[in-house]
Image: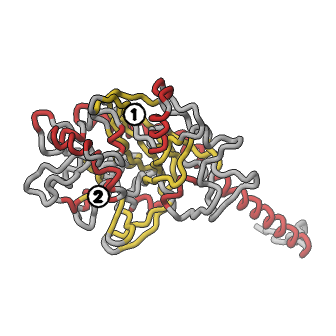
Amino acid sequence: MIVDQSHHGRKAFSLIELLMSIMILAIGLISVAALFPAGIVQQQRAKDNIDGPSVARSAMELIRSRISQEDFGDWTEFYSPDEVSDLIADGDLEESPSYYLADGDWPWLRPALVDPDNYPDAAYRGAVDVFNWLGARNSDYTITDLETDSGYYEYCFSRNLNAQSDGYLDPLGIPFSRRDLRTDPPQVIFTMSDRTWPPTGSEKQVPQYFWDFMLARRGGAVYAAVFVYRIAGGVENARSWAVEPARIGAGRSQIPVPAASELAELWNVGDGNGFNRPLPGTEGDFDPLDASASWQYPDQWIVDNIGTIHHVERGRNRPNQAFSDGKGVLLFENVPSSFVGGKLVGFDGSVEVLPRSFSVPLPDAAIDAFGQSPQLHGGGFPDASVPVVDRLWFVPRTINTSSSGISKQWELVPIYVMVERL
């Protein structure tokens, strides 16, 4: 067979055609590269909007499966009646939120966090202990809200009733029920695996979301706030993440998630809207790496001392960022008014009205306004000058950990918050 291998019908590309083809290809690649990151971000955001509430719902049901209303108690159950009377009569509680709460209630408290440097069992790395069962055995095993603000939380806690512990009679953690004169806290521990979604069943499975929570008691009922978030930085970061104490210098640590922040400038009723009431303290200096200020980030989710969920509509993520309209951070919904009640108490033949919010701590200025405005006993703070928010809880954007001598900075992405009664 004779095969004709000549190619008289083909014509080679000219140099100009070749250069034009390369140019067109380069322009196309640049265009795709410009669109690709934006597409990924939008796709991830859409996924987060769908998955966030589902993860929070799953977390809430897991919490309910392990603890119930009957497991919790009043902090005063850990003191004798005379001790409680002495504390209140001496005015020691006037700076504590529990002084203004309805009897038996307490503000937002975070479960104790296992300290891996002092409790090195790998199975408990990142674990949270609701009633601080481990801390009742050795106070070095965990850290609590006391490390963040001992004055604010001291009289809201249970006490360590384990006489064999080095922390005997010290503040312990979230108050547990003392029915039948119980002295040992219930053992309710949520491991890092428990707080991972989807549940990590194998080494090959990559965690997509994580969640943490805090608890408060108001009106005799316990409420939970669940914070859902992601870990940025790729697969290895997601696989190696665990909540560990954030070292804050001088041998001190604090619980990093959810972060707790006391506001330097309090929020008033009506603040945070898009007209003329930006959030106080959001128009000046801003450090995006300061975890305590990262509630100002765009799309951040926040729970305040009253229990209101806030969602940041316009936020800041650059150093000292300012806006052309001269206003600061804005919320999707402005700060709502807060109902205030009271109870009559007799002292030396006189009658005093003690403020009792609906079992949430209010700023001192709001308490003062309550005492000066009897009409507020009917409920609500209609006066926009009255501050009602002085503390926030949220997922910080960055966390610095240093366990076992290894320092690392993590980037977290807040996804969703849910607050419900247990």
The residue most toward the top is 378
Q: Position of residue 32 (x, y in %)?
A: 73, 58
Q: Amino acid at mark 1?
A: Pro
Amino acid carrying mark 2 in the image: Ile
Q: Quadrant of residue 270?
A: top right
Give x and y (percent) for residue 308.
49, 38
* Residue sitting nearer the eye, 248 or 92: 92
Q: Quadrant of residue 67?
A: top left
**What's the mark number on residue 131?**
none
**Residue 83 vertical position relative to residue 104 in the rendered view, above or below:** below
Front residue of this view, candidates 352 and 119:
352
Q: Residues within 10 Å of mark 1 (few under 14, many from 20)?
A: many
Earlier in the chain: of badge 2 and badge 1, it is 2
Position of residue 85 measured from the top left corner of the image (x, y, whole percent): 21, 40
Q: Residues within 10 Å of mark 2 (few under 14, many from 20)?
A: many
| Quadrant the N terminus occupies | bottom right
The residue at the point 57 percent across, 64 percent down is 287
Residue 355, which numbered label?
1
> From the image, which quarter does the C terminus lie in?
top left
Q: Secondary structure at mark 2?
A: strand
Label 2 belongs to which residue? 143
Determine the secondary structure under disc 1: strand
Residue 215, visible in the rendered structure: no
Q: Is residue 146 among what the camera can see?
A: yes
Which residue is painted at 28% across and 51% down in the image? 154
- What colour scheme governs how the chains and residues are painted in the rendered image of this protein? secondary structure
380 sits left or right of 223 in the view: right
The label nearer to you, 2 versus 1, is 1
